[in-house]
Amino acid sequence: MGDLGKPVEDGGLPAFSVFRENYGFVPRVFRAQAVLPRLLNAEAALANAILFRKTDLSRTEKELVALAEAAAAADPYGTALHYQTLRLLGMPAERLDSLLGNPDSEELPANLDTSLVRAWTAFVGTLAVGLNVRPDFPAPKVNRGALGAPPSCNLYRPKLDGSDDAAEFAFFREEFGIVPNLFRAQASWPEALQAEAQLISAVLIPEDVLSRLEKEKLILEVSGAANNEYAVALLSSLLEKRGVTAEECDQIAAGEGPAIDWGGFSEPQKVEATATAALAKFFVQLQIALGVEPDFEVRLISRASPQKNPNLLAEQSRPTAQDLVVDPDIQIVDAVRNGDVDAFEGLIDRHSRRVYRTLVGILGDPEEARDAMQDTFLKTFQHLGDFQGRSKVSTWIVSIATNTGIQRLRDRKPVESLDEAGDAQESFRPRQIRAWTDDPEQAYSKTERQRLVESSVMRLPAKYRVVLILRDIEQLSTEEAAAALGLAVPTLKSRLLRGRLMLRDALAPHFIARSSEVSH
Amino acid sequence: MISCADFMAEIGNYLEGDVAEEVRLQLESHLSHCAICQVVVDSSRKTIQIVTDSGSFDLPQPVLEPIAQQIMAKIRKEGS
């Protein structure tokens, strides 16, 4: 591969020669870690296993996956690096520009290969943010308005092959006490497993910079910030074996553990903490791509305070497609911050209905919801200075409403819980199996239908009611609703289905077609 | 051939149009001969439509207006 940049002084580290060989230069994100060569060696080995060597996909195909992933995640460092690499590999600029404007223009397969490349991209993106390095090249223009959802990996579901006793699992069995599903899902690719084991060993095991316990707590915190139930369950189990209480684990995952003093860190500590967070992002992204089931009982990730983001790295959760679109509320927020208090009325005007519906969903009481709406907007105003644009303003406000509602719910006796505990055990089987009339909306007036829906929705348990209201009445996307409620996407989907089926049963007597009976 | 239980396990994603083509074909093959699952899918879709179109839990302007003014009064007091 030709020279992409100017020659750099790199001190002759072996890992640097791997990067120079494969990029033509040593990217800044790796140069910035020169104080800890053990990390660089492991990262070079991982890059070799995942990205540099040809597998079922060529290097060019992998770089295309990485470019699409980096662009979808609004990661300027990765976007610039993969764009320039592809140019050097002979890809025409027009094709790359077309990909950046429309990710669907490339048919990207979903398999273990691409899942690992996506995880690697998340890893490097997190390193770049944490180490605060500028892109190596000017970032190409990304048509954010046209950018759709990040490429989906939902079609690929690996088999969990391999005996637990297999040699390639020995490291994971030793470290975790079991072979986590995330690694069993990669049984067909021993080279990747080996490189991942090397990375875990290099990042976590040495205690010369940060202690292993500190690093595992950081991984738990990053996993919680990303709402990743899988990683939270795994890390909590690991930490509990080390004597950390379940309550403390829950607090860390919820972002309420002791704040990390990044400002007081030495250079090696900053680098190692960043690599630790990047490691967490790698496995979180890989779990999302592979969709593997948790190894342990899923724990509730309850971010009680959406404003509290204890450190830079924990905040780098992957932006959704909505985050890439310009937020129309930002101007209002800026105006209020600059002293124009009256501009805040614009936020009330635009979001009061959504806030009210969220609170009705949680509290099940319109009068209390109106009262809690006032609290919500006052808190929004008080914390406006803390809003840092990592989500849409509307999502942030709804999450404040959610927390306000949950707090009021907790103050009630008896308490109605929105917790996830028990979700998995509950099953719901539709009871009404008689066909509905062809055009049910003609059967009642709009006012009658509204009254019917409201009374039926109000009888649902709160945890289903609020999800159904946000998705089907307020029309939030699954990702937005999950973010606002602090739930994992699979949990939100499962509650939505349960709520819809319960509501279907409740509405059925009003809409069943006469003379229709389906027999079992 | 998938069972009703298999179908119900996927119905959430199916209603959202969020299943792989191969899975969708299997589900629809089951639907083509299972009257019970047909009823559940059809009535679930109609439920979603009715709920979405109902405009439920709206906050009419005359109700919202005084609440908004109360909030703004508190904010102006706090901001001053």
Image (cartoon, rainbow, N blue to C red):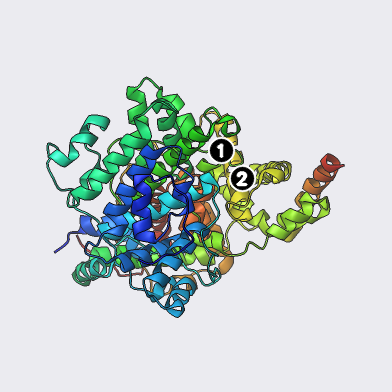
Badge 2 is on which residue?
Answer: A401
Q: Quadrant of residue A117?
A: bottom left
Q: How many C-alpha atoms fall within 10 Å of the one at disc 1: few (<14), some, or many (≥20)? A: some
Secondary structure at badge 2 equals helix
Separation of marks 1 and 2 at Cα, in angstroms:
23 Å
Seen at 61% across and 45% down, the residue is A401
Discs 1/2, front: 1
Residue A164 or A139: which is nearer the viewer?
A139
Is A407 located above or below residue B60 in the figure?
Answer: above
Left or right position of A342 against A182: right
**Image vertical order of residue B44 relative to residue A307, above or below:** below
Camera-side residue: A188 or A27? A27
- Secondary structure at badge 1 equals loop
Residue A467 in sight here = no
Q: Given the image, on which type of amino acid does mark 1 rest?
A: Asn
- Residue at the far right: name it: B80
**What residue is at 67 percent from the left and 54 percent from the top?**
A352
Chain of residue at mark 1: A
Can you see residue B46?
Answer: yes
N-terminal of the pair, mark 1 or mark 2, is 1
What's the mark number on residue A311? 1
Picture quarter containing residue A404? Answer: top right
Q: Residue at x 54, y 27 (%)?
A: A258
